[in-house]
Image (spheres, coloured by chain):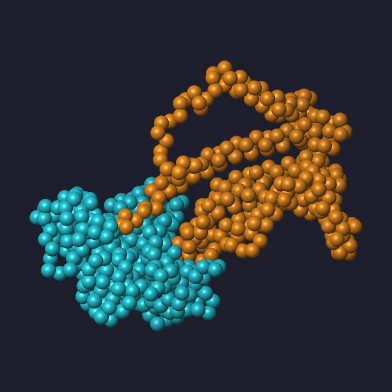
Chain colours: A orange, B cyan
Amino acid sequence: MAGAGGGHRAAPRPRSGMSEPAPVRRLLIAATLVVAGCVLVLPLASVFAEALRGGLGAYLASFRDPEALAAIRLTLLVAAIAVPVNVLFGLSAAWAIAKFSFPGKRLLITLIDLPYAVSPVVSGLVYIMIYGANGVFGPWLAAHDLQVIFAVPGIVLATIFVTFPFVARELIPLMEEQGTEQEQAAMTLGASGWQTFRRVTLPNVRWALLYGVILCNARAMGEFGAVSVVSGHIRGKTATMPLQVEILYNEYNHVAAFAVASLLAMLALVTLVAKAVVERRAGAAAAQITTTEVETEPQRREAP
Amino acid sequence: MSIEARHITKTFGAFRALDDVGLTVPTGRLMALLGPSGSGKTTLLRIIAGLEQADYGSGQVLFDDADVTVRPVRRRGVGFVFQHYALFRHLTVFDNVAFGLQVRPRKERPDKDEIRKRVGDLLRMVQLDTLADRYPGQLSGGQRQRVALARALAVEPQVLLLDEPFGALDAKVRKELRVWLRRLHDELHVTSVFVTHDQDEALEVADRVVVMNEGRIEQEGTPDEVFHRPATEFVMRFLGEVNQFHGRVDAGRVAFADVELDAGDHGRLAGPARVFVRPHEWEVSLAAPSQAAIRAVVKRVQSAGPVARLELRTAEGALLNAELPQETLERLGLAVGSEVHVTPRRLRVFAADRVPPTPGV
């Protein structure tokens, strides 16, 4: 607020200043719907249309293919590893950043965002540079008969990399805003560090955490670029669902490709619904917090 | 349990929040740490609680002669009440109060019925037993602060520490709660320290008041002592309104404005001095009194309330504030423009050889 006097606005703004004339409004809404329809809904619908083109029988038969099943299993495995790892990391990073001050804190926050900024292909290549046959750890890994690149560990690592910021990013602002007073209160009441975390910190961030997990999971299952680089596309072994879609599509096996793609599309829909539900719950929780703050405006001292 | 803090120094970067402070709170007393913001009072309280550590190598905190300086906060057995309550907002009132009992190790933890009984007793004591199932977000500020107090008392602390406990409440609730806190203390007799920047609160509630300024203790004493016998100019100015004059002390007499008076206890000072008179300590008369008096004209009368407040302009052009009982105002028939003579019934003189501290607001 720029007003030096800090007085209240005398009257609400006239309504016409806030909203456009009715025809303009309708036009804008219609344009938005058309664009959203063409860009978002149509492709999604066509995924299912293509998948079912050969009939339900052909659609279901696509999932009896051992390679498709292997791709689904691999994707679930990767997500089952990457998501918990990122939850663990996200919680500890957010905890450290929000509750303590230490040198390099801002740098760490920036670093967490790195996977957002860098192209997934680049992150895949970086892993090859590090763990590949000619990479930094390559000879050591080869000597111990460990394969990272063109194998499941590489896919997991690349997925963890690209999903790195999702949980931490959701938690950091919330935990910073909440401060440490409740934790301090818990400690004065005799709670240990773990009790404080489990009984105070975690319940306070549960919706943000869940939100982060949903986004993290969607990305972990859907990641293509980085995984594509490190996977080696070994059918039935290192092909995740997105890679399997590409393989099938390149072989002009459209029904099978779109059948697998339809699973990913369904994952997206489930993610959207879950996200909306969590947002609503988190919004309700936030509203409760807001009412908490209403009466806590510090009072001025009345005496001179 | 008595509390003692010795030689506490605390710096935040270049800022010295506490400078070699020592403090003793005898068992069962209710002590106020009073001072403007930035005076170090909250920092001192947090160091006593263990939420903050004194600078490395400086100072000691003792509870009943036991050195607790390095004891972590959760083992100090203190009840701490935060200015903004710090209630667990995802827990009900009941669970907030029960928290301290529920986190105890299994063998020290009371059983469920015992917890329910103790929490119930505490909630009755703070008159919130009907709201046990509410969440903090559904309570008023005053109710929240009482939950916070019940929660702190649930662990049966040896020491109760309150950081601006009523600072976030509106004036009326604040007044009620401080009377209530005093009564509660008289019942429980747990050694308590509370931080405040409100002098009325400190003077009304506490057994002893410690006035702090810029990381140091200016004065410690009973409310009467600090109010009536301020040890320093800062205390004088911080505890109530003052009229200030520049003057001189010479041979037991103090000269200021256009009067010269007996300096009384302050006679041993000599040289430039600052003279303070509280508004209610002026003797106002229409006729010139026998004693030396300042001549002034009434510029403003504010008579709504039990005490009438006058703004006076002296012959020298300085403005004075005076407070009179309503009856005196009526008896003298004072109005804007009246010419009066004022002389202090009581004055305090401090040597003017150092830069005056300015109390923050």
Residue A27's quadrant in the figure? top right
Q: Which residue extends farthest top?
A: A23
- The answer to whether A51 appears left or right of A282 in the picture is right
Quadrant containing the C terminus of chain B in the rendered view: bottom left
- The answer to whether A54 appears left or right of B181 in the picture is right
What residue is drawn where x is 47% and y is 58%?
A182
Quadrant containing the N terminus of chain B in the rendered view: bottom left
What residue is drawn where x is 21% and y is 75%?
B262
- The answer to whether B346 appears left or right of B33 in the picture is left
Q: Position of residue B250 (x, y in %)?
A: 27, 78
Please say if B121 is above or below A290: below
Q: Position of residue A62 (x, y in %)?
A: 79, 34
- Residue B132 seen from this side: no
- The answer to whether A191 appears left or right of B295 in the picture is right
- Residue B21 seen from this side: yes
Residue B94's quadrant in the figure? bottom left
Please say if A217 is above or below B40: above
Q: Nearer the viewer, residue B170 or B354?
A: B354
Q: Nearer the viewer, residue A257 or B130?
A: B130
Q: Position of residue A124 (x, y in %)?
A: 81, 49
Q: Nearer the viewer, residue B16 or B116?
A: B16
What residue is drawn where x is 83% and y is 50%?
A125
Please say if B47 is above or below B120: below
Q: Position of residue B99 (x, y in %)?
A: 43, 60
Numbered-mark total: 0
What residue is drawn where x is 12% and y is 68%?
B290
Q: Which residue extends farthest left?
A: B331
